Amino acid sequence: MAFTGKATYDGGPSFDELAEDVSDIIGIVSPFETPLLDHLGDAKRPAISTLHEWVEDTLLPNTGKINQTIFSPDPQTETDIIVDDASVFQVGDLVRPSASDEVLFVAAVDTGTNTLTTVRSYGGTTAATLADNTILNILGNAALEGADAPDARFTTRTRRQNYTQIFSAGIEVSGSMQAARAVGVADEVDYQKQERMREMLRDLENCVINGVAPASGQQGSSSTRRSMNGIIHSLLTNTFLPGVGNIPPGDGAGDELNEAVLNAALKKIWENSSGAIDTIVVGGAQKRKINGFATGSRAYLPEDTSFRNLISVYESDFGVCKVVMSRWVPADKVLLLDSSRIQVMPLQGRSFQHKALASTGDAVNGQVIGEYTLEFKNESAHGMIETLAS
C-alpha cells in the first residue's frame, strides 16, 4: 500500500483485534552486579578438595621491642636492655632505635631473661633516650673474620585453609509454561537458569566479602552445611580504628574517612608486607568520602558545563589502588587489598552449571549449582578500616 501520511487510529480495526504493545525486553531492577569478582577475575586453578589449603612463610624478623620501664643509671647510658624476645637478636647485630640516629652493638644475648648487653653510641653515633616499647631495628649482623658459621635459624611454614561452600537453586517449569509463548522470553527454562545464575553470582560476591565459616563441623555432611570465611572475617592483623590506638588522632582524628586516615592505614600495611595494596573496596557511603578527597582542589572555568566528582584510582606513596564500589561491603568499612594474593576458585568440575533433573510429572526440572572457596593469602598483607561514620 502506498504511503498516505494519514493516521489509522480511526476507522481501523477494533481494540480487541490489535496485538498487545509489550516490549520484548524484560527489565531487572534488583542489583546483581559483581564488581569485586569482575576485578579479581577467574582463578588460575581450581580447588581440588572441599578443604582448600595453602602454605605461607615469613622471613626472620629484623625488629624487636624494648620491654623495660626503669633504666639505670639513665635511658641514655643503659647498656643492659630488656626486650620482648631476645631470640630475634644475635651477637654482632647493629641495632638502631626508632626515631633516633644512635646505633647499638649487641655484645651478648641472654634469651633466658630476654636481655641484650649492648655497646651504646657505636661508631660515635649520638646516644638516644630509650623508653618502653621503643622499636629496635636490626640493621644487619657484623660477623667475625674466619669465624665458625652461626647457629642455624629458620621460620616455620604455616598451612592456612578455607572451606568450599555450595550455592544451589532449583528450577521447575510446567510443560504448559514451557510450551506457551511468553512476552520477552523465548525459552522459559533457559530464562530461569539465567535468573538463578545471577542470584548465585551476587551471593558469591557477598560471601567472598562477608562470609563466615562455622566454629566447628566445617567439613560439612548431609546434615551439616559447609560455609567459607570471607575477606572481613579472615582479616586479623591490620584492622584499623581511626582516632583509637593503631590510627591515632594525629593521623586523622574522629571517625570520618579522609586522606590522613587512609594513608596511615596504607603505611602500616606497607610496613608489615612486601606487597602493595592495589585495591580499595568500599560501599556507597565511603566511596562518596573518597570522591570528596579532591573536591576542594578542583578548578572550573566559566564555560565548563559539567561537574565530575569521581575517583576511580587512588595513587599514594604506598601503591596505586583501583577503587571498587561493591554494595555488599558494610557501610562503616573500607577494605584494603592486595589482589595478587586473592583468588575465588571453584571446586574442580563444580563451577556454576545447570543439571537437568528427572521429571516426576508434567514439568521440566533442573538445578543450578556451584561450589566455591576464597583463597586469601598472607592476611597481614591486607587491611581494613572500620567503625567509620557512614
Image (cartoon, rainbow, N blue to C red):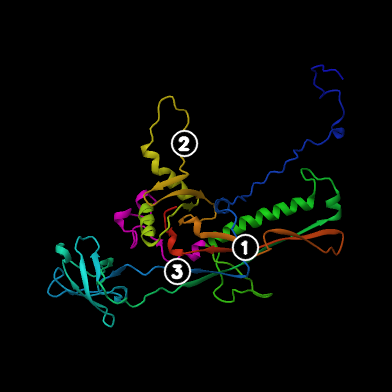
Task: Measuring from the top left, give residue 12's x and y in whole percent.
Answer: 86, 25
Q: Earlier in the sequence, mark 2 or mark 3?
A: 3
* SS label for mark 1: loop
Q: On the image, numbered disc 3 is attached to which residue?
A: 57
Task: Measuring from the top left, give residue 145's x and y in whole percent.
Answer: 25, 71
* Viewer-proximal residue among 234 and 107: 107
Q: On the image, numbered disc 1 is attached to which residue?
A: 46
Q: On the image, numbered disc 2 is attached to which residue?
A: 308
Please tell me in which quadrant of the rendered image residue 24 appears. Answer: top right
Q: Residues within 10 Å of mark 2 (few under 14, many from 20)?
A: few
In 3D space, how far apart are the residues under numbered discs 1 and 3 (Cα atoms)?
22 Å
Q: Amino acid at mark 3?
A: Asp
Q: Do callouts 1 and 2 mark residues in contact (Cβ within 8 Å)?
A: no
* SS label for mark 3: loop
In 3D space, how far apart are the residues under numbered discs 1 and 2 (Cα atoms)?
41 Å
Q: Which mark lies nearer to you, 1 or 2?
A: 1
Farthest left residue?
73
Query: In this rendering, does residue 128 appear at all?
Result: no
Query: In this rendering, does residue 168 appear at all?
Result: yes
Q: Earlier in the sequence, mark 1 or mark 3?
A: 1
Q: Earlier in the sequence, mark 1 or mark 2?
A: 1
Drawn side of residue 179 relative to residue 143, left or right: right
Q: Residue at x 59, y 73 (%)?
A: 218
* Viewer-proximal residue among 267 and 221: 267
Task: Measuring from the top left, give residue 224's x and y in whole percent.
Answer: 64, 74
217 w.r.t. 332: above or below: below
The residue range painted magenta reads: 231-260
Q: Which mark is residue 199?
A: none
Task: Measuring from the top left, give residue 191's x and y in whole percent.
Answer: 75, 50
Residue 387 lies in magenta, yes or no?
no
